[in-house]
Amino acid sequence: MSWMPSQDPILGDARSCDALDLVIVPRTRDLGDGFQVRRALPHGKRQMVGPFIFFDHFGPVQFMSGKGMDVRPHPHIGLATVTYLFDGSIMHRDSEGNAQEIQPGAMNLMTAGRGIAHSERTPDVQRRDGQAMLGLQSWIALPKASEDIAPSFQHYAADLLPGVSDTGFTARVIAGRAFGVTSPVAMVSPWFYAEVALAAGFSAPLDPDHEERAIYVVEGEVEIAGDRHIGPCLLIFRPGDAITVRAVSATRMMFLGGDALEGPRHLWWNFVSSSQERIEQAKQDWKMGRFAHVPDESEFIPLPE
């Protein structure tokens, strides 16, 4: 795809008005200690966009000295998690022995497959000094044939992910292909994820080649074919039509989507599967301690009643 970012007055064509399928304003959930998330997926009117089945926006929050995030070890099956930060750091540890400090702009893809447990905590230095936190966590549902693959973890620092920039526009391609460049991240099904920043008055295209597509406006205001949307919101588009998004104010967005999966998924707690029986097995496996343990961690989150 060859393109250049554009400045006013390009607003997209008339077809773009009809291409917007659903606007989701994420609902806010308080996880305790003043730590709030905004949840866009799953939604009553839409379970997935491509394989994206869960989409949380957390922060901005300021942790004072001595405070931080402590998500004790918990299990996953049938999905891959993407933790993407704009501000702050998180220490990831999992039952495969991976330990990685997640930093802004990096790609961190944990594929649960047949089962993995992990914890997410504020690193020691940031806990001592305090830190601001802003980021996103997404779950990618796995294709039916890959739901029970071996668990794994991929980490790519921000400077290893391909970027595109021009006047009034920057993008980092976190996964898949967008704006003519391809991320090095390995995937088991076709999907894409990119961070896009636009200065006020500048525009960028949403690639029409992907089967299912959405834009998550993290902050700022955008205009698409004359309609304005203020973040945070998830804009889901029908396939096929060319979309041009213009920034009314300085805007940070995520472009995301991919191929639709074979059908809907069962989703319970941290488990995703095409089979309800597999979900029930995972419940019992966690309850009975049959998941591998996260090294050097004795705490865990019990199975919800």
Image: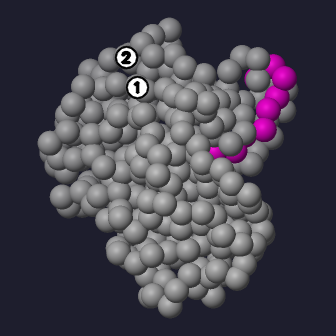
The mark that comes first in sequence, 2 or 1, is 2
Query: Label 1's element?
Result: strand
Main SS, magenta residues: strand
Question: What's under tag 1, amino acid-wise?
Answer: Phe
Residue 177: x and y, percent? 42, 49
Rendered view: 128 above or below 218: above
Residue 190: which disc?
Answer: none
Rendered view: 281 above or below 233: above
Residue under numbered circle 2? 96
Question: What's under tag 2, amino acid-wise?
Answer: Glu
What is the quadrant of residue 204 in the picture? bottom right
Q: Residues within 10 Å of mark 1 (few under 14, many from 20)?
A: some
- Give the residue drawn at x 20%, y 34%: 148
What is the quadrant of residue 117 in the picture? top left
Rendered view: 117 above or below 183: above
Is residue 128 at least partly visible in the picture? yes
Circles 2 and 1: CB atoms closer than 8 Å: yes
Query: Label 2's element?
Result: loop
The N terminus lies in which quarter of the figure? Answer: bottom left
Residue under numbered circle 1? 153
Residue 220 forms part of the magenta stretch: no
Left or right, 141 with respect to 67, comes to left
Q: Residues within 10 Å of mark 2 (few under 14, many from 20)?
A: some
| Residue span colored magenta | 127-136
